[in-house]
Structures are given as C-alpha cells and as structure tokens.
Amino acid sequence: MGTFPSGVATGGTHVHDRSVRWGVLATGPMAAAFTEDLRTVPGADVVAVGSRSRQTAQAFAERFSIPRAYGSWQDLADDPDVDVVYVATPHAHHLAAATLCLEGGKAVLCEKPFALNRSQTESMIATAESRSLFLMEGMWTFVNPLVRRAREMTGDGLIGEVTSVHADFSARVPVVPGSRLRDPAAGGGALLDLGTYPVSFAHLFLGAPDHVSAWAHLNDDGVDESTAMVLGYDNGAVAVLSCSLAFSSATGAVVYGTEGRIEFPADFYHPRSFVVHRDGRAPQVVEAEPRVGNGYGHQALEVMNCLREKRTESALVPLRGSLDVMTTLDRVRALVGVRYPGE
C-alpha cells in the first residue's frame, strides 16, 4: 500500500495534467446522489455508467448527460477511457463489482461498507495491491471537513486525552417485502447499513478496539433490527454505539476527553456543526462551511488528488482503517448471531 511504482498510473493513463474520467457502476439513489455532486467538482468528468440492464443504464446516462451507457459491469470495466469507477451497488455485490473493475485496470471508490466481511475486504485490497491500483472505501465522514477539524482538535489535546465515544445512527425503515435492508442475502440489517457509521466514528477517535461486546434484536430472517455495541480499550477508553431500523434518532455523537467533550448534536456522519465544551470555559460552536450539493464532493476530490499524486490509497481513508472497521463489524455479528449466506 502507498504509492505507485515509478511511471505507473491508474487506469492505464496519467491524470495529473487533465480531468479525471469517472465511471459509475449501478444506477440507484446512491449512484445518482454521487453523480450529481461529481458534476460540481472541478476536473471531474463522468464519461460512462454501467448497469446490469442496458435500459436503466441508458436512462441514467440521459438523466446526467453521460456519453456512454453499458448494459453490463464488464463493459464498464473494459472502457479504456475510464480512470476510476465509483461502485454504488448494495454491499453484497461490492466484492464482485470492485474486483471486476480492478481487474480491468480501473481505480475504485467503493461505497461503504467496503464489503460483507473482513475476508472480502482483504480480497479487494489484495487485488488492488497486486495491480498497483488505487482503492478507497466511500466513507464520506472521514473526508468531511468538520469531522476532520474535530479530529485535529482532539489530536492537539484540546479536550485532553480521549476517553470515550458515544454515537447512534437509527432510522425507522418500514418493513417492505423484498427490501434489501432486511434480506440476509443482500447483507441486510441495521449494523452494516447504519452501524458502520458509529463504528467507523469510534475508530476515527479511538482506533481499533481490544474488546467488543454486543446485543441485537434479530428479525425472523436472522438480520438485526437493532444493535448495541460496547468497544473496550486496554488503556481504559470505551465506545458506546448503537443503530436501529426500528426507530429514528437524532443521530448524535459525543467525543469525551479528560478535559472536555465535543458534541455533535445531529448527523455526526456529515455534520453541520459541533460544540466544544472545555472545563471552565464557555461552549464553542464550530459550524461547517456552506455545503455544495449532497456532500459527496469531498471524497471525490480526495480520490482525484490521490490519483494525480499517483497514490494507491488515501491517507484520510486508509485501507488499514477500513479493514479494522470491517473486523469490528465481523466481531459484532459473531456475538449477536448474524450470518450471511455463504459465510
């Protein structure tokens, strides 16, 4: 992991002196939101979209004025004019889609969670490394400027030593027959769709845990409707995390330190503000700059900067970090009894 060997460039061509040519794999809501934002990013050029259906690919291409539409993932992976592919499929298909694109010589930005489990994540990373290609998980929280600012503050010791993280991401999702969110074959459940955010947030401020405890309520199909987690650290730190498909929450988070705390009142995964409370001082509100689009442009810029610098991974969203998060998610699933077909 790290940088490209001398003279090697992603996608088969150098991108340092021209626009970065994006392909989009899948045509659902995530693909649409990301593509909308790509059109606002300087130097980004969306040149192709791929789907398992020629009809849906063509409709997506017409919607976003994309010149080429492919009715298969393979055709997108084979397009010589694509530098990087954004994989926006449900996570049960991330391994297959990302591997296909990497084997086609394309850099890949793969939507979170990286895959279904650690084994799949390791496979994706190995494929990227063997080809000296860029790979990054689409965890927009890690490249969010406000979250980065909070991380810098804790790193500078503003609230002393970080001792605890509390975070919840719950959103009531009605039970709909056939929905992927409750389908074991699709990697359904609250944990991988929502819980990956509080787990990643805890990892950002505390690192990978030494101990994991968890409880979950499972539905009749064996996927989690609600999950609660406690991550323990040998230095005495602790993270208390939760997620649910049964109710909606404020999606708040707090980072506690020995000399204060940082509170995210809502949407900690892409916040508009946070409040710094330091012992003996008035609270300090830190607000985000006006957001452009849906908020995905920051990760697109990070990918493009890495490609132009001929790097195979991002320092902000490192592969080791994504692997550690997936390891924690695996440990939680093992504790609560959630298994997916084929595991």
Image (cartoon, rainbow, N blue to C red):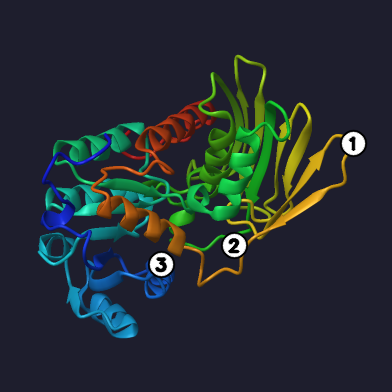
- The kind of residue tagged 2 is Pro
Disc 3: CA contacts within 10 A as few (<14), some (14-19) or many (>=20): many
Residue 287, given in percent of the width and then of the height, sits at 69, 59
Give me the residue at 33% from left, 52% from top: 110
Q: Earlier in the sequence, mark 2 or mark 1?
A: 2
Q: Which mark is residue 34?
A: 3
The image shows a total of numbered marks equal to 3
Q: CA distance from mark 3 to mark 2?
A: 25 Å
Look at the numbered disc 2 and give the secondary structure of its residue: loop
Q: Which mark is residue 174?
A: 2
Q: Which mark is residue 280?
A: 1
Foreground: 199 or 236? Answer: 236
Q: CA distance from mark 2 to mark 1?
A: 45 Å
Residue furthest front in the image: 17
Disc 1: CA contacts within 10 A as few (<14), some (14-19) or many (>=20): few
- Residue 219 visible to the viewer: no
Q: Is residue 101 left or right of residue 137?
A: left
Give me the residue at 27% from left, 72% from top: 46
Q: CA distance from mark 3 to mark 1?
A: 43 Å
Residue 87, given in percent of the width and then of the height, sits at 31, 57
Q: Is residue 248 left or right of residue 147?
A: right
Foreground: 121 or 343? Answer: 121
- Residue 119 visible to the viewer: yes
Foreground: 191 or 303? Answer: 303
